[in-house]
Structures are given as C-alpha cells and as structure tokens.
Image (tube, helix red, strand yellow):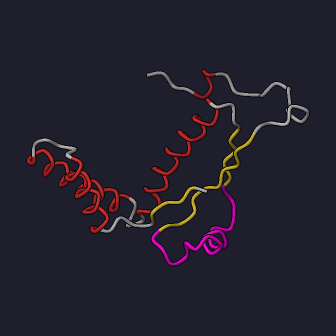
Amino acid sequence: MFTTRKTIPGEHLEEIFAKERADGRFADPEIQSGWEAGAAGFVKIQSENYGGDVLHWLEKNTYLVVGATMMAAASLGVDATPFEGFDRAAIDEAFGLTDTDFTTTLIMALGYPDETRVSHQPVSRFEAEKIFTHM
C-alpha cells in the first residue's frame, strides 16, 4: 500500500530542514538557507500551479517511488502489479488513515508468477515511429 501526504504544512518542511541541519547535509549555512528558501518556494509554486490541489502533485511523487519499487522487485525476480480504482475512503478507514494527513494512492501486489498460468502470447504494441516524436 502506498500512501501520500495530503498537504505539506510549514511544520513538516521545518521538520525536514531541521533533520538536514542535524545531519550536516550542507556544510555551509548559507547554502542550507538558500536550499530551504528554494524548497519552500517550490512547494508554494506547485500549490499554485495545481489550484491549491497539492495532493495531485504529491501523488505524482508517490508514483516515482512506485516505479522504483517495481524495478527493485523485478531485480529480485518478484512480479509487481499496481492497482488503482479502489475505494480510497474504505481503504483509508480500514488502515486508520481517515483522520491523518495521509491517504492511499495505490495498492501493489507482489509475488512470484505461476508459470502454468503465464501467457506466452506476443504483446501488441505500436511501432516506435507512431508513439515518439523526434525533435
């Protein structure tokens, strides 16, 4: 189950920045300060670009993690199938997310294939020239 933070409150950003400072992520405090201002500004821009729907933007970031998880699973010989189209409210309630700042974005099944049920038929795909534009 992959969840996404619904908002990015200032307190959350400050918590991230404090952790980065504690970890010594930036040796130069001026660079750290610039990073913090830039990150906060980027969150503001994204909030404005999506009409205040930060969840839409944040879910796109969750899908980056989903892709990495599927590649990691494949490298271990594990199949991964992501699912959307479920009742988000019901899943959130079942896992105690309803009154939190998180919501379910995607569910993923992981496992090993049953070779007796695997299709060995060819997959149909358009030719590259039909789907890509080279500039």
Is 24 displayed left or right of 108 in the figure? left
Residue 66 x %, y %: 55, 45
Q: Does residue 128 sit above or below 14 in this rendering?
A: above
**Quadrant occupied by the C terminus:** top left
Where residue 78 sits, quadrant-wise, is: top right
Is 131 displayed left or right of 61 in the figure? right
**Quadrant occupied by the N terminus:** bottom right
Residue 3 x %, y %: 53, 60
Q: Does residue 57 sit above or below 111 in this rendering?
A: below
Where residue 124 sits, quadrant-wise, is: top right
Q: Residue at x 45, y 50 (%)?
A: 61
Residue 30 x %, y %: 8, 47
Front residue (pair 128, 114)? 114
Across the whole image, how many numbered discs are drawn on residues?
Answer: 0
Q: Does residue 87 sit above or below 35 in this rendering?
A: below
Please tell me whether residue 88 belongs to the stretch shown in magenta: yes
Residue 80 x %, y %: 68, 41
Is 24 displayed left or right of 15 in the figure? left
Q: Residue at x 69, y 31 (%)?
A: 77
Q: Does residue 43 sit above or below 109 in this rendering?
A: below
Please tell me whether residue 26 belongs to the stretch shown in magenta: no
Front residue (pair 95, 56)? 95
Residue span colored magenta:
84-101
Front residue (pair 58, 98)? 98
Which residue in the rendered view is the most extreme toward the bottom?
99
The dominant secondary structure in magenta is: loop
Q: Residue at x 28, y 62 (%)?
A: 15
Where residue 52 sits, quadrant-wise, is: bottom left
